[in-house]
C-alpha cells in the first residue's frame, strides 16, 4: 500500500551520502527562509562589493542602520501572518512609538531614557493588544480592523508630535547608531539580533510558538488539539505590537528624532520582506529570520543603484520584481516536484 | 449497574444553531466495556451530539452525567480531562506542523502514541514528517492513536472508516475490540451497517434530533435499526424503490462515452471501456487503484498521457472541465467541497454551471432559472430549511444539491465518483433511484462507489480496477459483494486462470 511506503524511512537505498543529501533537502524544504535568504543576501553582498570595491565598515554600518527598522517591521508582520492574520497598522504603531520615544526622551538622562524605552515597549504591546482584541472579539476581518486602527494610530502619532522633532540622549542614540568594539559591528545589528533572540526564541520554543503555527495552519484542527485559538491570535497581535515598538525606538536611534509620518512606509515594505523571507500569507509557514534577512536584501537594492549611478527610484521596481520572482519560485518548484512524482 | 460506574449518560440534550434545530431531545447511555453505535440519517444530529459530548459546543438544554457526576464542558480540553476523547470525522492534525509537534501541541505523550501506532501496524512512522505530506489513511490512524494515548474512559469515533481501505478498517476494529476488552467504552459512529453489526454491542438511533431507540446489536437487528432511522413509513417506501426497475435496453448507435487505452501517470494503464446511453456502468476498486485518475481524465481535470476519449463517436481532448461539460460530461465528486460554493444559496449553487457559456453572460432570466432550480430541488427532495447558505445544510443534502445542479442544466453523461460517501441510507436510496431514473431517460452514467453492495443495486454492468487496469468485467447481476471484493483485491484473474 502506498501509504505505508510513504512512511518507510529507508525505502530508497541507504547510502550515507544519499541520506545526508536528503537531510539537507528536507531542511531546505522545512525552513526555506533559512537556506534561500542567506544565499540571496550573500549574493547581493557579493554584487555590492563587486560594483563598489570600497565597500567598507561605514557602508556596513549604514546598511545595518537602514535595514533595522524594516527588519523589525517584517518581524512584527511575520508573527501575525504566521498566526493566520495580517496587521496593516505595523507602520503606524512604529510611528507612534517613534514619536513617543523622541518626545519623552528629549530632556531625559541616559538612565531615564532606558526606563522610558521600556514604557514605550509596553505602549507598543498595548497597541498590538488593542488590535488583537478587536480582531478576535468583533469578528470583523483583520484587514479591515488593522487598516482602521492604523489610521487611528497615525492620528495619535501626529497628536504626540506635529512635525519631525524631539530627540534622545546621545548615549541612548548610540545604542543603535554607534558601533561596538570594531567599526564593523554596529549597534543596530546587535539591537536587532537581541530583539529577535529575546522576544522570538522563547516564543518559538514554548507551546505558544507551536500554537501560533497551528492556528495559522488550520484553526479547527488547532482548536480540537486543545489550543486556545482566540488567546493565541490575540498574543500574536500583541507580539506584533512589541516588535513594532522596538522598530519605532530603533527609528528614533537611527534618525535621532521622532517623525510622525516616517512609519507609514514600513507597513507594506515590512509585509513585502515577510513574504520575500518565506512567510506564507495564508499562515502557518515561515519564520522570522528569513524576513529579517529579506529586509537587508531589500535595503541593499537602492544602495547598489546609487553605487551604479542609476536612479534609485528604480529600486521599487526591482524590489517588486524580486518579490514576484521569489514567490513564483515556490510555485515553479511545486510544479517540478509534482511532475517528478 | 451503579450509576457511578456508568462512564457517560446524557439525557434531554437540545441544541439549535440560529433557526436550525440540530438536537431536540437526545439521550445516550454508554456502559463500561462496550462499543456503542450511534446511528442516524444525515442531519439527525449525530455530529452535533458528538460536539456537545466533547466540549466543542455547549448544549442549550439537557444533562450530562459522567461516572455519577453532573458535568458541563466548555472546551475539548475539559472533556479530555474528564476522560472523553473524540476522533473527529476529519483529521484534527495541523497540516503545517510535524507529527511530533502535533503531539506536543495536544500535550500527548509520544511513547503512548508510538505504542498505539505499533498496534495499528505503523510502528515505523516518522514523527518528524509534516502532516501535510502524509496520506489521508495514515492521518486517521495517527488521530486514533493520539486519542488513545490519553487513555480515555470513553472514546468517540466518528466515521473513521468512511474512506479507509478495508485492511486498515480491520486493524482499527481489532484495536477497538482490544480496548473494549480492557473495560473501556467506545461510541462508534458509522453509516456502514455491516461494521456496526460486526463491532458494536448496542446501538442508539437518532432521528431528527431525538433519540428514537436503543437496540442490542445482534443478527437481525439491522432491519430494526433501519426502521428506527428512517421512521417506519419511509422505510417501506425506500425498500420498494431499492428494487431496481428492469434494466433499460441499451440504446443503439455509437456509445455515449468510449475510453480507449487510456493511461495517466503511474496509476492508470491502458484502460478501455464503453458506455451506451441508458446504461449505468459501475466501477469497483480499493483505495488508489487509478479510479481518481480515470475520472479526472474523463472530466477534463487532468491531462491524459496517452489513449483516446470518444464522446458519441467523436474523439475529444479536454483542456479544462468546461470542455467536458460542453461535451455533456459532468462530474459529481466525492468531496462536495470541491464543487460547491458553501456560502451561497442552494439556488445559486444549482444554477451556477448554466452560466458557463458566453451567451449567458448577459442579464440572467430569473424566472426561468427559478423554475428550473425549483423543479430540480423538488425532484431530489432537498431539505430547504437552510437554503440561504449551502454550508448550513447536512452532508446528504449538500450532495443532493450537487446532483441537482446537473439536472437543472443539461448533460448526456454523468460521472459519479463515490456520490454516497458519508451519506445516510435514506438519502442513498433516493440517489440510487435518481440514477436509475436518469438512465431510463437516456443518460449514460459512470459510477465509482466504495460501497460494493451498491453495484448490483444500481448498475447494469460492472468493471473492477486493480493496479491501474481493468481486471474484471461482468454484468451487474453477477456482481455480488464477494465476487467484487475478490476481484478488487486482484484475486479474480488467478481464479479464472485456475478454473
Image: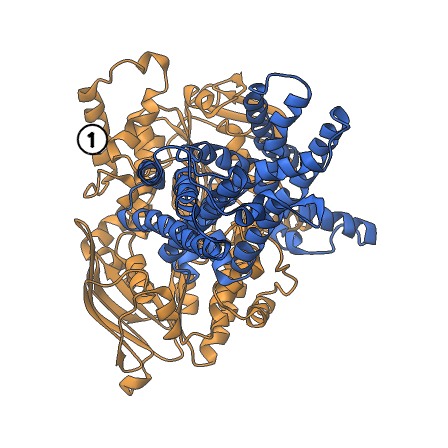
Chain colours: A blue, B orange
Q: Quadrant of residue B228?
A: bottom left
Q: Quadrant of residue B203?
A: bottom left
Question: Which residue occupies the foreground of this view, B168 or B229?
Answer: B168
- In this picture, residue B311 sits left or right of residue B33: right
Compared with A213, A40 (above or below) is above
Q: How would you rate the neighbour count of disc 1 (Cα within 10 Å): few for under 14, some for 14-19, many for 20 or more?
A: some
Residue B222 left/right relative to A72:
left
Q: Which residue is mark 1?
A: B374
Measured from the top left, where is residue B159 in percent x and y? 41, 57
Q: Quadrant of the C terminus of chain A?
A: top right
How far across and down, in percent of the image, does residue A238 sit? Answer: 40, 52
Name the spot of residue A16 as percent of width and height, x first: 82, 54
Residue B464 in sight from this viewpoint: yes
Q: Chain of mark 1?
A: B
The local secondary structure at tag 1 comes to: helix
Vertical comparison of B90 with A257: above or below: below
Residue B169 appears in the picture as rendered: no
Q: Position of residue A193 (x, y in %)?
A: 60, 50
Relative to A6, residue B390 above or below: above
Q: B93 and A142: which one is in front?
A: A142
Q: Residue at x 24, y 31 (%)?
A: B347
Amino acid at each position: 500500500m502506498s501509504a505505508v511506503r510513504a512512511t518507510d524511512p529507508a525505502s530508497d537505498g541507504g547510502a550515507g551520502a544519499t541520506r545526508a543529501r536528503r537531510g539537507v533537502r528536507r531542511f531546505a524544504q522545512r525552513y526555506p527562509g533559512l537556506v534561500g535568504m542567506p544565499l540571496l543576501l550573500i549574493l547581493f553582498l557579493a554584487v555590492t562589493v563587486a560594483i563598489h570595491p570600497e565597500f567598507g565598515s561605514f557602508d556596513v554600518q549604514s546598511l545595518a542602520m537602514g535595514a533595522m527598522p524594516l527588519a523589525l517591521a517584517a518581524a512584527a508582520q511575520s508573527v501575525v501572518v504566521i498566526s493566520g492574520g495580517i496587521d496593516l497598522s505595523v507602520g503606524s504603531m512604529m510611528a507612534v512609538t517613534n514619536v513617543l520615544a523622541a518626545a519623552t526622551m528629549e530632556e531625559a538622562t541616559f538612565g531615564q531614557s532606558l526606563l522610558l524605552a521600556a514604557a514605550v515597549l509596553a505602549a507598543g504591546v498595548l497597541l498590538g493588544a488593542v488590535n488583537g482584541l478587536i480582531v478576535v472579539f468583533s469578528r470583523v476581518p483583520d484587514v479591515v480592523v488593522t487598516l482602521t486602527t492604523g489610521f487611528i494610530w497615525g492620528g495619535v502619532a501626529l497628536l504626540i508630535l506635529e512635525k519631525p522633532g524631539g530627540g534622545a540622549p546621545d548615549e541612548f542614540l548610540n545604542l543603535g547608531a554607534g558601533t561596538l568594539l570594531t567599526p564593523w559591528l554596529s549597534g543596530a545589528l546587535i539591537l536587532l539580533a537581541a530583539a529577535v533572540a529575546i522576544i522570538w526564541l522563547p516564543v518559538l520554543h514554548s507551546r505558544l510558538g507551536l500554537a501560533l503555527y497551528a492556528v495559522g495552519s488550520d484553526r479547527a484542527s488547532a482548536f480540537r488539539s486543545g489550543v486556545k485559538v482566540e488567546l493565541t491570535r490575540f498574543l500574536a497581535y500583541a507580539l506584533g505590537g512589541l516588535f513594532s515598538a522596538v522598530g519605532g525606538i530603533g527609528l528614533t536611534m537611527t534618525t535621532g528624532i521622532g517623525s510622525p509620518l516616517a512609519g507609514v512606509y514600513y507597513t507594506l515594505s515590512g509585509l513585502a520582506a515577510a513574504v520575500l523571507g518565506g512567510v506564507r500569507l495564508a499562515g502557518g509557514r515561515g519564520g522570522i529570520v528569513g524576513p529579517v534577512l529579506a529586509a537587508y536584501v531589500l535595503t541593499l537594492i537602492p544602495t547598489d543603484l546609487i553605487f551604479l549611478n542609476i536612479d534609485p527610484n528604480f529600486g521599487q521596481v526591482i524590489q517588486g520584481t524580486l518579490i514576484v520572482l521569489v514567490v513564483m519560485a515556490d510555485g515553479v518548484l511545486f510544479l517540478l516536484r509534482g511532475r517528478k512524482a | 449497574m451503579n450509576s457511578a460506574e456508568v462512564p457517560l449518560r446524557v439525557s434531554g440534550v437540545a441544541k439549535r444553531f440560529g433557526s436550525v434545530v440540530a438536537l431536540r431531545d437526545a439521550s445516550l447511555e454508554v456502559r463500561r466495556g462496550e462499543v456503542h453505535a450511534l446511528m442516524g440519517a444525515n442531519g439527525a444530529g449525530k455530529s452535533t451530539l458528538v460536539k456537545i459530548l466533547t466540549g466543542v459546543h455547549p448544549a442549550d438544554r439537557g444533562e450530562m452525567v459522567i461516572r455519577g457526576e453532573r458535568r458541563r464542558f466548555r472546551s475539548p480540553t475539559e472533556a479530555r480531562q474528564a476522560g472523553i476523547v473524540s476522533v473527529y470525522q476529519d483529521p484534527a492534525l495541523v497540516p503545517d506542523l510535524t507529527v511530533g509537534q502535533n503531539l506536543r501541541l495536544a500535550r500527548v505523550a509520544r511513547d503512548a502514541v508510538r505504542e498505539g501506532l505499533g498496534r495499528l501496524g505503523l510502528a515505523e512512522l516518522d514523527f518528524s514528517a509534516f502532516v501535510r505530506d502524509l496520506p489521508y489513511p495514515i492521518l486517521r490512524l495517527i488521530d486514533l492513536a493520539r486519542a488513545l494515548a490519553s487513555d480515555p474512559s470513553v472514546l468517540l469515533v466518528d466515521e473513521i472508516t468512511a474512506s479507509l481501505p478495508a485492511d486498515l478498517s480491520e486493524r482499527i476494529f481489532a484495536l477497538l475490540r482490544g480496548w473494549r476488552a480492557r473495560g473501556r467504552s467506545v461510541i462508534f459512529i458509522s453509516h456502514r451497517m455491516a461494521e456496526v453489526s460486526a463491532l458494536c454491542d448496542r446501538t442508539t438511533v437518532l432521528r431528527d434530533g431525538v433519540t428514537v431507540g436503543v437496540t442490542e446489536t445482534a443478527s437481525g437487528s439491522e432491519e430494526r435499526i433501519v426502521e428506527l432511522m428512517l421512521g417506519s413509513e419511509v422505510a417501506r417506501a425506500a425498500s420498494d424503490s431499492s428494487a431496481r426497475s428492469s434494466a433499460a435496453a441499451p440504446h443503439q448507435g455509437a456509445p455515449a462515452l468510449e475510453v480507449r487505452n487510456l493511461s495517466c501517470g503511474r496509476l492508470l494503464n491502458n484502460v478501455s471501456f464503453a458506455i451506451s446511453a441508458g446504461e449505468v456502468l459501475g466501477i469497483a476498486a480499493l483505495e488508489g487503484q487509478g479510479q481518481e485518475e480515470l475520472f479526472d481524465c474523463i472530466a477534463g481535470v487532468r491531462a491524459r498521457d496517452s489513449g483516446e476519449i470518444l464522446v458519441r463517436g467523436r474523439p475529444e481532448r479536454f483542456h479544462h472541465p468546461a470542455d467536458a461539460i460542453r461535451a455533456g460530461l459532468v462530474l459529481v465528486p466525492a468531496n462536495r467541497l470541491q464543487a460547491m460554493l458553501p456560502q451561497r444559496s442552494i439556488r445559486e449553487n444549482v444554477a451556477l454551471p448554466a452560466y458557463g457559456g458566453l451567451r449567458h453572460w448577459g442579464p440572467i432570466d430569473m424566472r426561468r432559472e427559478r423554475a428550473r432550480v425549483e423543479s430540480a430541488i423538488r425532484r431530489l427532495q432537498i431539505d430547504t430549511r437552510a437554503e440561504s447558505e449551502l454550508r448550513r445544510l447536512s452532508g446528504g443534502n449538500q450532495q443532493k444539491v450537487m446532483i441537482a445542479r446537473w439536472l437543472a442544466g443539461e448533460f448526456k453523461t454523468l460521472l459519479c465518483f463515490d456520490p454516497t460517501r458519508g451519506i445516510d441510507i435514506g438519502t442513498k436510496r433516493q440517489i440510487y433511484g435518481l440514477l436509475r431514473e436518469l438512465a431510463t431517460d437516456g443518460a449514460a452514467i459512470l459510477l465509482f462507489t466504495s460501497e460494493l453492495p451498491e453495484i448490483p443495486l444500481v448498475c447494469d454492468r460492472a468493471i473492477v480496477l486493480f493496479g491501474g487496469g481493468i481486471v474484471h468485467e461482468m454484468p451487474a447481476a453477477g456482481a455480488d459483494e464477494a465476487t467484487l471484493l475478490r476481484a478488487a483485491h486482484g484475486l479474480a484473474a488467478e481464479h479464472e486462470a485456475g478454473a
